[in-house]
Image (spheres, rainbow, N blue to C red):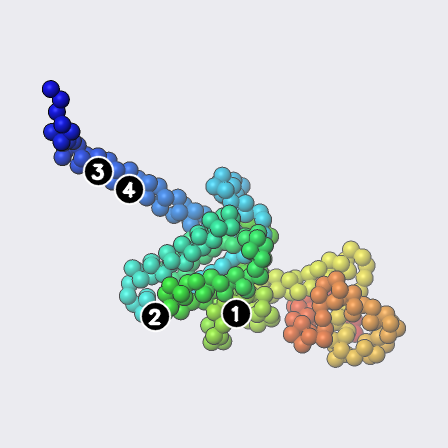
Amino acid sequence: MFLSSWMLPGPHPSFIERAANICAIHILNERTAIETEHRMKGELLEEILRQPRQDFYVTNKLSYLGYNLNKPHYVFVFQLQNQHIMNEGDDSLSNARNLIADILKKQTTHAEEHILVSNQFVQVHALIPEDLLVKRKLTITQYGNELLGEIRSQIPSLQLFIGISNLCQDINSFHQGFKQANKAIEIAQIKRQKQRVILFSELGHISILLDARNPKELENYANGVLGPVFDYDTQNSTELLKTLYFYLSNECNLHKTARKMNLSIGGMRYRLTRLKDLFGIDLMNSSTRSEVQLSLDIYIAFGKTSFAK
């Protein structure tokens, strides 16, 4: 005699409870593994950002995780400003940081590019590959504003600065990029800027004022402005740096400078055109003149070059 299906004995409640416990443990293990991986990546990123030089071990470990950090990247620093979020404690801070991290990770999925992210109290740090911007056909400013808009749409009250470094070419330049992104935020705060996405490249010579007592920072700044010109002069036995020096010393008077350097007017115009075409130094721009003058003064003070008047 056959039993109807409703008469068949069902699973014992203890089996159901055991199965539920096994599933819960499996989910917990998966979550723990994911959290451990994110924490490890964050720790590696912090090491990269805070150490001037990286050994092969760090580079190799990141390559196994799918990160090629010897391609150009930007360093992003997200600075949380809200005093009431800080006063509310760890939960509010954690939620804001996690939101930023989640938005950045979503970018990874869409663009198929790996983004390293770490959380540090009132900051979130990230390495943004240049390839991501190329794929999305965005400038670095557009991308920063897009991120800011998305974050604000979810936490409208959040006050946030985003500092962005110059383009870093390899893993050993991220430490300098990290300092640049933080400096951009610091200067924006001092100047009480309303602009919330700040590029270090747009700060000009004011960027070194915070490190005026640090000779290495001064030298790095001067090299950033005039290093390519210095190298070109050395390799080609030209006098473009000297031309800059005398042109600025003579208040950008073409005729006075030509006489001082025993050049024709045509020769002076040619040199100024070369400076603009080869190195982007446009002396018609007042900010450029200030940066070049300051860099020349640093070179002379450090004995890197000299010019007889």
Relative placement, left or right, of 250 versus 58 is right
Q: Secondary structure at mark 2?
A: helix
Labels 3 and 1 touching (C-beta < 8 A): no
Q: Which is nearer the eye, 179 or 94?
A: 94
* Mark 3 or 4: the one toward you: 3
Relative placement, left or right, of 122 versus 76 is left
> Label 3, label 1: how many angstroms apart (C-alpha)?
59 Å
Q: Secondary structure at mark 3?
A: helix
> Label 3, label 4: how many angstroms apart (C-alpha)?
12 Å
Labels 4 and 2 touching (C-beta < 8 A): no
- Image quarter where the N terminus lies is top left
Give the residue type that dot 3 points to.
Ala
Find residue 28 and name its label: 4
Give the residue type that dot 1 points to.
Leu
- Sooner in the amino-acid sequence: mark 4 or mark 2: 4
The residue indicated by pointer 1 is 210
The residue indicated by pointer 2 is 83
The residue indicated by pointer 3 is 20
> Label 4, label 2: how many angstroms apart (C-alpha)?
34 Å
On screen, residue 208 above or below 121: below
> Label 1, label 2: how many angstroms apart (C-alpha)?
24 Å
Q: Which is nearer the eye, 302 or 69?
A: 69
> Label 1, label 4: how many angstroms apart (C-alpha)?
47 Å
Q: Position of residue 153 (x, y in %)?
A: 40, 65
Labels 1 and 4 touching (C-beta < 8 A): no
* Mark 1 or 4: the one toward you: 4
How many dots with numbers?
A: 4
Q: Which is nearer the eye, 297 or 243?
A: 243
Q: Position of residue 2 (x, y in %)?
A: 13, 22
